[in-house]
Image (cartoon, rainbow, N blue to C red):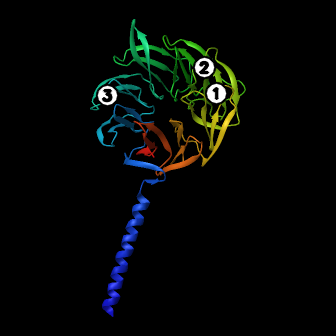
Amino acid sequence: MKRIMLLIFVCFSSFYSMAQDNTNSQDTSPIINYNAKITWVKDLKNQLASLLTASDNKLFAVSKDGKIFCCDFSGKIIWEHDLKRRIAGKPIDSDGNLVISTLSGDLISLNDSTGESIQSIGLNEPLTSPIVKMSTIYNGNPTEAVILGSSKGSIYCYDINSFEMIWENHSAKGAVMSKPLALGNKIIFTSSDGYLYCLDSRSGMLIWKWTDPKINNIDLANCAPVSDNRDVFICSTNKALYSIDPMLGRTRWKMDSYKCNPPLVISENKKYLYVKSTKNYFNLVSPIDGRSIRKLDMDFGEDTSMSSPKEWKGSILIGAGNGRVYLIENNLKRKPLFYLKGGAIQSITHLVDDTFVVSNDSGRLVEFKLK
C-alpha cells in the first residue's frame, strides 16, 4: 500500500512540475499571436531611441544609450557598435553609409555592412530630430544632403558624403524633435516654441512661420508635418488638427473634434489623413476640408504612443500603447494581429512583400507576415 501511495505521489509531483513548467513558459513568452504568421522574435534588451531603419536586407535599431544593432531580415545580428553617446532621432542609410546624430552634438557615419566608423563631426549642440535625406545642389554639382534639427531650434544641411555644411538656419527658438518635411524646394518643420517653419531647401532662408494665434503656449515639438503635395497637415499637442497652405503659411482649416494623437499619416493615394485619437478611435479624414469620412472604434483605451499607421495594399496596420498590433482590412473591419509584451508599440516597418517587423520601446522585435 505504501508503495502504491508513493508511486501516486511521484506521478502527481511529476505532473504538477510539468504543469508549472508549461505555465511559466506561457507567462514568459514575449508574444501572444492572434492572426499573424510570426517568423521570428528577438529581444535586444535595450530601450530603443527611435524607429527602425530598413535598407538592402539590413535592419538597424538604435538604443537610447548609443548602441547600434544591425540585423538581416532573418533576425540574425550582423554587427553591433557602441557609440557610448545618447541618440534621439532616427538615422538614415544611404549608399552604404549609416548616418546617425547624437545628443552630444555629433553627426556620425558608419559602414552599414561592418559597423566601422567612416567620419564624424561635432556641432556643439544636442541633435534631437530624425535625419531626412534630400537631393540638392552644392558648389554647382548635384549631391545628396542630410537635414537635421537641434534642441536649440537650429536646422542644419550637410553634404552626406563629405559632411561639409551647405547651410544652417537658427530661426526657431525651441527644440526641433520631429521629422522635418522635404516638400519641393521647401523644408517644413515644427518646434517646441509653438511655430511651424518653412525654409528654402536650397539656401536655408526663412520663407514663413505659422502658429495658431488663438492658443497660448501651443507646443508642436512632437508634431511631424505631412503633406498631400497640396497642403501641409499637423496635429498639435493640444489635440487639434490643422491644414496649412505651404505657399503662404496660412490656415486653411482646423478641427478639434478628433482629439488627435501624433503622428499623422497621409494615405498612399493622398485621399485620406489617418488620424489616431488619444482614446479608442481611428479616423479617416478628408485632407480637403477636414471632414470625417470614417470613424473606427479600435477599443485600445487611452493611447499616446507614437507608432505610425502603416498602409499595405488597401489595409492599415496600427500599433497601440497597449502592446497590440491591429489590422484594418479593406472592408474597414478591425482584427488584432498579436500582442507584444514589454511596452508600447514603437514602430511598424515594411521589409519586403507582405513581411513587416514591429518594435516596442523595450527593444523587442517581431517579424511577421500577413496571412
Q: Which residue is mark 3?
A: 110
Q: Is residue 27 above or below residue 231?
A: below
Which of pointers 2 and 3 indicates the residue nearer the eye? Answer: 2
Q: Is residue 36 above or below residue 113?
A: below
Left or right: 296, with 32 as reference point = right
Q: CA distance from mark 2 to mark 3?
A: 36 Å
User: Is residue 66 in view from this perspective?
Assistant: no
Residue at 43% in and 16% down:
135
From the top left corner, tell me how far across and down residue 253 is, in percent.
Answer: 70, 25
Left or right: 113, with 267 as reference point = left
Where residue 230 is drawn, which disc sits there? 2
Q: Nearer the viewer, residue 309 or 101?
A: 309
Q: Nearer the viewer, residue 126 or 69?
A: 69
The kind of residue on which mark 2 rests is Arg
The kind of residue on which mark 3 rests is Leu
Outermost residue toward the front in this view:
331
Q: Is residue 340 above or below residue 291?
A: below
The kind of residue on which mark 1 rests is Pro
Query: Disc 3 or 1, which lies upstream in sequence?
Result: 3
Q: Which residue is mark 1?
A: 287
Give the crowd class for mark 1: few <14, some 14-19, many >=20 residues within 10 Å. many
Q: Secondary structure at mark 3?
A: strand
